[in-house]
Image (cartoon, rainbow, N blue to C red):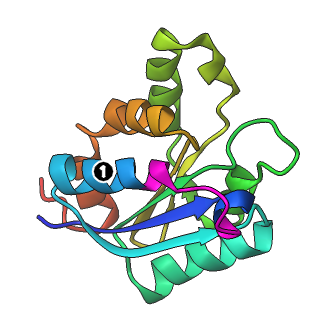
Amino acid sequence: MVWKTAILTASDKGARGEREDTSAQVIRELVEEELGGEIIEYRIVPDEPDEIIAALIEMTDYFHADLVLTTGGTELAIRDVTPEATRRVIEREVPGMAEAMRYSAMQKNPGAMLFRGIVGIRGRTLIVNLPGTPKGVHENLAAIMNQLPEALLMVTGQFRL
């Protein structure tokens, strides 16, 4: 199964072209190599709730991504608003996946408890918030990678008992 995947980076500096988006590169590699997914959309937006919301809606409703992976905006800084924007878009949360990411990352770095990312469903799309660093992206995505195919089958309505 080839999963249609979109990547959304929330970063003021990235949106202004002042920072290379290395976290999205890690996501791309993991999706293509580990998940067998295809990147159908990639976008960088500033840490503005309305822009994050608009991008998430477009990626789910227009591009019909099976999976949207966000990076950035998930810690405690005042401009870190990705989880709040995601909550305004999703219909249901998937707390176990977010808990698994936090738990796994905390085994290596106690500071991972400051990660506020969530996982949720909009329509037939799974949306996963990831940290803004390449290392954080890798650790968190690796923590749920083995369950992503089953989750995507369920969310997209293809799961068969």
| Residue at 39 percent of width and 36 percent of height | 138
State which quadrant residue 85 falls in.
bottom right
Q: Is residue 16 magenta?
A: yes
Q: Residues within 10 Å of mark 1 (few under 14, many from 20)?
A: some
Residue tagged by mark 1? 151
Q: Estimate the x, y position of residue 18 in percent, counting from the top left.
A: 67, 60
State which quadrant residue 117 falls in.
top right
Q: Is residue 45 left or right of residue 102?
A: right
Is residue 56 something that shows in the picture?
A: yes
Q: Between residues 88 and 47, which one lies in front from this camera angle?
A: 47
Question: For the view shown, which residue lies furthest in the right direction?
Answer: 78
- 129 up-or-down from 85: above or below: above
Q: Between residues 21 and 62, which one lies in front from this camera angle?
A: 21
Is residue 96 something that shows in the picture?
A: no
Q: Is residue 121 magenta?
A: no
Q: Is residue 150 left or right of residue 82?
A: left
